[in-house]
């Protein structure tokens, strides 16, 4: 056994698949999901986690090598979306496939995709505990190991500019977000990005929980125990590289047992 007293506490801890990778994983379902089914599942999973505000919000997925985006339509809540409801918009937010319309707020996503090669999936909504901290003008304090996922990844956009419904306003917001993977918008909500739906869903669901924990600690009036940066580095790698896939697998298996209509 390693004697932790001999470890350099200031040296970044190793983590993720560099340390260990599973040789076999439980199947998510009976067969591979289509892209539309995958995105519909992401909406349902996040709705069940409280990462939503009734009819608000979008998730877009711009798949590698393309400029079109899969997205939810205006008029349906995340909790009721099915695969056949998913629309496709081009990089200018014009609907090119689907039965429904898409709100101009989608420009938040088109401009982030345009500026950020790493942001293949963009999630935006107004989850409750994120909004509490957004109203207080603060990012969550990282008080639990899962918060390591957001180490050096967060930005607070201080000015509330109202509805973002044009490419110009969206471009200004995207530039304020920069390369952050999580942006809390003052008096508004949050934007979370990821490389794919698995990573983005896990990052988004866990961020609402991180905000809830941070707020609950805040209202005690006591100081949280500090987390060493060197330890958080390795945990961050493990969460993104290993835990995201496990979270997605379990969440989708539950979804398919209880809400199989999501695949329709």
Image (cartoon, rainbow, N blue to C red):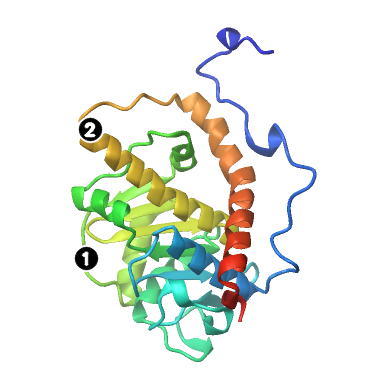
Decide if residue 196 is in sight here: no
Residue at image coords 30%, 44%: 139
Name the residue at the bottom extreme: 99
* Quadrant hosting residue 131: bottom left
Q: Nearer the viewer, residue 221 or 181?
A: 221
Q: Is residue 233 above or below residue 255?
A: above
Q: Which residue, given by chain and number where applicable, does mark 2 sit on?
A: 220
Tell me the distance, in whole angstroms, between the alpha carbons under discs 1 and 2.
32 Å
Tell me if 27 is positioned left or right of 171 in this view.
Answer: right
- Circle 2: element type: helix
Q: Which residue, given by chain and number where applicable, does mark 1 sit on?
A: 161
* Quadrant hosting residue 107: bottom left
Residue 143 horizontal/vertical position (percent): 38, 33
Residue 242 horizontal/vertical position (percent): 64, 44
Tell me if 236 is positioned left or right of 14 in this view.
Answer: left
Residue 69 horizontal/vertical position (percent): 54, 75
Q: Nearer the viewer, residue 64 or 5?
A: 5
Residue at image coords 50%, 18%: 10
Name the quarter where the C terminus is drawn.
Answer: bottom right
CB under 8 Å between discs 1 and 2 = no
Decide if residue 140 is in sight here: yes
Q: Is residue 102 above or below residue 111?
A: below
| Mark 2 closeness class: few <14, some 14–19, many ≥20 residues within 10 Å | few
Q: Nearer the viewer, residue 62 or 111?
A: 62
């Amino acid at each position: 056994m390693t004697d932790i007293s001999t470890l350099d506490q200031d040296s970044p801890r190793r983590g993720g698949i560099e340390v260990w990778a599973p040789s076999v994983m439980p199947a998510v379902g009976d067969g591979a999901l289509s892209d539309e089914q995958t995105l519909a599942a992401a909406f349902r999973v996040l709705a069940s986690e409280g990462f939503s505000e009734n009819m608000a919000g979008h998730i877009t997925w711009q798949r590698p090598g393309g400029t079109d985006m899969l997205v939810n339509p205006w008029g349906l809540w995340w909790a009721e979306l099915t695969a056949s409801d998913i629309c496709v918009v081009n990089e200018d937010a014009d609907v090119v496939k689907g039965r429904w319309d898409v709100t101009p707020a989608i420009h938040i996503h088109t401009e982030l995709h345009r500026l950020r090669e790493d942001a293949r999936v963009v999630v935006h909504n107004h989850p409750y505990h994120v909004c509490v901290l957004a109203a207080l003008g603060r990012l969550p304090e990282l008080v639990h190991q899962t918060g390591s996922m957001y180490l050096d990844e967060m930005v607070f956009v201080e000015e509330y500019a109202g509805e973002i419904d044009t490419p110009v306003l969206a471009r200004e917001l995207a530039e304020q977000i920069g390369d952050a993977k999580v942006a809390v918008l003052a008096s508004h909500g949050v934007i979370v990005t990821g490389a794919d739906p698995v990573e983005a869903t896990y990052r988004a669901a866990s961020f609402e929980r991180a905000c809830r924990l941070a707020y609950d600690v805040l209202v005690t009036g006591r100081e949280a125990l500090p987390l060493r940066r060197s330890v958080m580095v390795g945990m961050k790698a493990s969460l993104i590289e290993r835990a995201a896939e496990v979270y997605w697998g379990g969440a989708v298996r539950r979804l398919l047992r209880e809400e199989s209509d999501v695949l329709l």
